[in-house]
Image: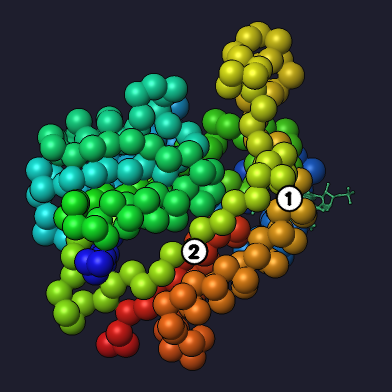
Amino acid sequence: MKKIGILGTGSCLPERIIPNSYFEKILDTTDEWIVTRTGIQTRRMIQPGQGLSDLATRASERALEMAGIPPEKLDVIIVGTSTADMLSPSSACIVQHRLGAKRAVAFDINAACPGFIYSLAVAQKFMQDGSYDHALVVGGEIISNRIDFKDRATCVLFGDGAGAVVLGHPSQEEGEILNIDIESDGDLWSLIHVPGGGSRIPLSQKMLEKGLHYVKMQGNEVFKYAVRTMADSAIKAMKAAGVTSDEIDWFIPIRPIHVLWTWWPTV
Ligand SMILES: CC(C)(COP(=O)(O)OP(=O)(O)OC[C@H]1O[C@@H](n2cnc3c(N)ncnc32)[C@H](O)[C@@H]1OP(=O)(O)O)[C@@H](O)C(=O)NCCC(=O)NCCS
């Protein structure tokens, strides 16, 4: 199987910064509560009219620049998101159009928070057999218009942004992705969900009035599950890669539920 490595990374955040003091003015909450429990002091939010592909395209341009890969060389573009620009087409197709990545296959993966890791895993499989050489994988969300600013348990936690990586076949000396562990537990689907706007409860005035287009979350249950499974997932990924914990230089918990482990030579 061919080696797969990250050749370039890029990110893009909206300019608008929302500090905790904003929520103190509109809700029964405090900066102290938010910081103590989450560490969050500020979050970024888009301006009305912006869409996910605005952030995703900029992040991708930065990743391509770092990788030194022109967009025409991309074979596949995968955007992991649950907040695409529109219901159809995929945001990946819009990113493809904006980049001019003419020959790429482009599609979204909706796996909510761990969407980036799922997308990375899919891109890795496409590339391992050598059929694709260059992949662009983006993770991004515009969650600020899916949260209820009257629900203090969710609105203080989320922000908007996008990150991108360009994958290729690295040289002997360069680092590679050793293993990715992804898991799903569909039994827990209701712990975080957006009930309205899909096929079961389509868009309607009544649905909007009930606030069914907003994220519903049992945060403390998510937290307990995430803490438990994060360690298990990390151990599995290390075992599969033949790496021990004392060989890990960086541990980056990108999302609470799913974890990516990469190992890069110490520099
Ligand atoms: C934020 C978090 C740490 C809070 O956990 P917690 O301390 O167990 O909080 P709970 O949700 O049980 O709420 C405890 C109390 O704080 C209150 N509370 C919730 N949000 C609040 C806020 N922003 N300000 C003040 N009080 C708040 C609740 O109303 C509740 O009050 P009550 O006891 O009077 O009913 C936790 O929900 C969390 O991290 N969840 C993870 C969510 C996540 O990662 N989601 C993304 C998944 S991909």
Label 2 environment density (alpha carbons within 10 Å; few <14, some 14–19, many ≥20): some
Going from N to C along the chain, the mark reached first, 2 or 1, is 2
Q: Residue at x 61, y 14 (%)?
A: 202
Label 1 environment density (alpha carbons within 10 Å; few <14, some 14–19, many ≥20): some
Q: Quadrant of residue 224?
A: bottom right
Q: Residue at x 12, y 35 (%)?
A: 102
Q: Nearer the viewer, residue 148 or 99?
A: 99
How far across and how far down the image is residue 117, in percent? Answer: 44, 55
How far across and how far down the image is residue 147, in percent? Answer: 62, 35
For the residue labelled by badge 1, is the local secondary structure a helix, a strand or a loop?
helix
* Cα gap from disc 2 to disc 1, whole angstroms: 23 Å
How far across and how far down the image is residue 79, in percent? Answer: 36, 42
- Residue 75, compared with residue 247, is above or below; it is above
- Residue 165 badge: none
Residue 86 is left or right of residue 53, and the answer is right
User: Could you tell me the amino acid type at mark 2?
Assistant: Asp
Q: Nearer the viewer, residue 64 or 118?
A: 118
How far across and how far down the image is residue 177, in percent? Answer: 33, 69
Q: Which quadrant, please, contains the C terminus?
A: bottom left
Q: Is residue 160 visible?
A: no
- Residue 177, compared with residue 86, is above or below; it is below
Q: Which residue is mark 2?
A: 181
Q: Which quadrant, please, contains the N terminus?
A: bottom left
Mark 1 Cβ and ligand 1 under 8 Å apart: yes
User: Could you tell me the amino acid type at mark 1?
Assistant: Gly
- Residue 203, compared with residue 15, is above or below; it is above
Residue 80 is left or right of residue 71, and the answer is right
Q: Which residue is mark 1?
A: 219
- Its colouring scheme is rainbow
Q: Residue at x 11, y 59 (%)?
A: 68
